Image (cartoon, rainbow, N blue to C red):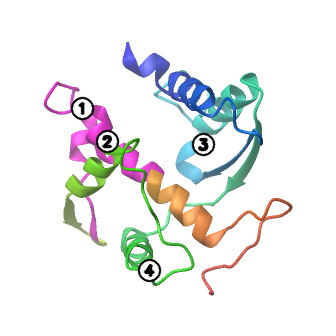
């Protein structure tokens, strides 16, 4: 089953792709959604599984907790400012290696909820099909969001985390 091997297989592919990289260190940004249960592997949480898998492959992991997820409207504004080049960091994508992520970002819909607008995540609960791959759903865009928020708000300099707390 795809769910049982999703995180370990993804991390193994990452480690294989970067096997010849000189610095075997990963800065792992995560929010509170990575804590607790882990439907992708077993009853151990995402944070523990990810750290354990990287370490099993010989990588050093620097875990950076971000606390509770950012509100949808704040996240949307922060990331859109980044894409527009108005933040400290402007995201760029390697088109050859990120077709799935680019498609997922382009096709992520929004909906209006009781607290305003947010990503429409209804598709995450549906069974995967050839026309509706897991890679093209909002799970991947959420991972990108967390990485961008972490890099923008809690940059890692190689020696210490720099907390900019949203003030640039």
**Is residue 87 shown above or below 45?**
below
- The answer to whether 80 is drawn above or below residue 110 in the figure is below
Residue at 70%, 54% in the rendered image: 64
Q: How far apart are the alpha carbons under marks 1 and 3?
A: 25 Å
Q: Secondary structure at mark 4?
A: loop
Residue 78 badge = none
Image location of residue 136, percent across then percent down = 27, 41
Q: Is residue 99 magenta?
A: no
Q: SS class of the residue under badge 2?
A: helix
Marked residue nearer the N-terminal end (3 or 4):
3
Sequence-first tag of 1 and 2:
2
Query: Which residue is label 1 attached to?
Result: 133
| Location of residue 99 in the rendering, given as x and y in whole percent from the top left corner | 31, 43
> Is 61 or 90 nearer to us in this picture?
90
Closer to the camera in the image, 96 or 14? 96
* Residue identifier under label 3: 35
Mark-to-mark CA distance, 4 and 2: 23 Å
User: What is the magenta range?
Assistant: 117-143
In the rendered structure, are the residues bearing label 1 and label 3 in contact, judged by CB atoms less than 8 Å apart?
Answer: no
> Which mark is on residue 100?
2
Are the residues tagged 1 and 2 within 8 Å (C-beta)? yes
Spatial CA distance of label 3 from label 2 is 26 Å
Label 3 Cα neighbours within 10 Å, binned few <14 / some 14-19 / many ≥20 = few
Residue under the point 51% across and 57% down: 146
**Given this view, does label 4 or label 1 mark the residue nearer the observer?**
4
Q: Categorize mark 2 by other alpha carbons within 10 Å: few (<14), some (14-19), many (20+).
A: some
């Amino acid at each position: 089953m795809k769910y049982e091997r999703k995180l370990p297989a993804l991390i193994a592919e990452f480690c294989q792709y970067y096997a010849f990289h000189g610095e075997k260190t990963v800065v792992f940004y995560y929010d509170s959604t990575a804590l607790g249960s882990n439907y992708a592997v077993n009853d151990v949480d995402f944070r523990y599984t990810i750290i354990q898998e990287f370490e099993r492959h010989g990588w050093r992991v620097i875990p950076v907790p971000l606390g509770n997820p950012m509100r949808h409207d704040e996240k949307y504004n922060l990331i859109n400012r980044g894409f527009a080049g108005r933040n400290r960091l402007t995201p760029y994508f390697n088109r050859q290696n990120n077709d799935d992520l680019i498609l997922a970002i382009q096709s992520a819909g929004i909906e209006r909820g009781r607290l305003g607008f947010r990503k429409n995540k209804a598709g995450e609960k549906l069974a995967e099909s050839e026309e509706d791959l897991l890679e093209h759903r909002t799970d991947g865009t959420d991972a990108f969001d967390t990485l961008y928020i972490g890099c923008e708000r809690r940059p890692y300099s190689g020696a210490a985390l720099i907390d900019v707390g949203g003030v640039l």
